[in-house]
């Protein structure tokens, strides 16, 4: 009986143009270890599958990786100058609503000018604003030339709505740079993580400032800093609350 079962398995594998092991790898089938990848050839079409975790299950997910006569994917036998690391993830597609798409030529609902706030030039505008972030409730603006981070507790609805607090400065009218955890120097970007952390790319201090909980008072010092050393100049920052990625502009690197 074992020989008959084995023969049937081999026959099925040959009929679909692959080996018995390949026949067991298909979209939605169980797989042994998250992150593993396999390439299965069926009727001269190579399909790459990656083992991903969906809920409590590990399943194969994949799609066509090359067509006959097409280019060979990196990491599947083609030459490459560096190692390729497979990264698996699961995601959900945002359902389409009037707020997820903007038609060509659509005018903005409004603007924000922050009239009345001091800047290095004494005008009523921001000085080199360079980054925006939000957790769905608060709005964070990186006011780079004024060496500060402006925070609205709720998204503003009028052009001159003043921020509720300021970071990297003790008052709304100070603009000096500094190196303490309560100061910054030419900040460039910010991100708010799903678990409430705030990260700011403090470019001229070559570091990322991290608040473990979302700040609630003006001048509140960061919990700690990720220091990259001289010559880094981090311009952009991203985090999911656990991992952090930063673009080190002067070095031409992305640090993770």
Image: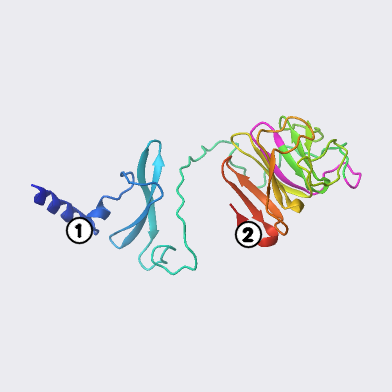
Kindly give the residue lying farthest to the left in the view shown: 1
The alpha-carbon separation of the residues under discs 2 and 1 comes to: 47 Å
Marks 2 & 1, CB-CB < 8 Å contact:
no
Left or right, residue 239 beside residue 234 = left
Magenta stretch bounds: 120-139
Q: Secondary structure at mark 1?
A: helix
Image spot of residue 129 (x, y percent): 77, 46
Query: Dot 1, how many residues are within 10 Å of its Cα: few (below 14), some (14-19), or many (20+)?
Result: some
Q: Please identify the residue farthest to the right as the structure is shown.
A: 122
> Looking at the picture, how far across and down is residue 239, in whole percent?
60, 44
| Residue 233 lies in the magenta-colored region | no
> Which circle marks residue 154 in the picture?
none
Dot 2: few (<14), some (14–19), or many (≥20) neighbours within 10 Å?
few
Q: Which residue lies at the image location 59% right of the left edge and 36% below the top edge?
A: 194
The residue at which mark 1 appears reads as 14
User: Element at badge 2?
Assistant: strand
Name which quarter of the figure residue 55 lies in.
top left
Q: Is residue 6 left or right of residue 210?
A: left
Which one is in front, 41 or 100? Answer: 41
Residue shown at the point (38%, 66%) measured from the top left: 77
Closest to the camera, between mark 2 and mark 1, is 2
* Label number found at residue 253: 2
Magenta span: predominant SS is: loop
Which residue is pictured at 20% across the width and 58% down the height? 14
Q: How many marks?
A: 2
**Residue at position x 41%, y 49% in the image:** 35
Tell me: residue 37, above or below residue 216: below
Residue 224: image location, x then y, percent: 69, 41
């Amino acid at each position: 009986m074992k020989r008959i079962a084995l023969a049937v398995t081999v026959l099925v594998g040959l009929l679909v143009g692959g080996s018995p092991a390949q026949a067991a790898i298909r979209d939605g089938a169980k797989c042994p270890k998250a992150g593993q990848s396999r390439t299965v050839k069926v009727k001269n079409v190579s399909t790459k599958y990656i083992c991903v975790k969906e809920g409590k299950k590990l399943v194969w997910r994949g799609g066509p990786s090359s067509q006959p006569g097409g280019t060979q994917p990196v990491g599947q036998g083609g030459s490459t100058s560096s190692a390729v690391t497979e990264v698996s993830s699961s995601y959900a597609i945002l359902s389409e609503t009037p707020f997820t798409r903007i038609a060509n030529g659509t005018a903005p609902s409004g603007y924000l000018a922050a009239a009345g706030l001091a800047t290095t030039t004494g005008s009523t505008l921001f000085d080199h604003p360079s980054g925006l972030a939000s957790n769905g409730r608060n709005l964070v603006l990186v006011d780079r030339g004024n060496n500060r981070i402006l925070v609205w507790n709720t998204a503003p609805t009028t052009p001159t709505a003043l921020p509720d607090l300021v970071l990297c400065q003790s008052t709304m009218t100070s603009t000096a740079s500094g190196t303490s955890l309560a100061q910054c120097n030419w900040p460039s970007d910010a991100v708010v993580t799903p678990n409430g952390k705030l990260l700011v790319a403090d470019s001229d201090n070559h570091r990322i400032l991290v608040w473990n909980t979302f700040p609630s008072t003006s001048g509140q010092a960061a919990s700690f800093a990720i220091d990259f050393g001289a010559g880094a100049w981090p311009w952009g920052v991203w985090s999911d609350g656990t991992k952090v990625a930063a673009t080190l502009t002067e070095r031409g690197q992305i640090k993770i």
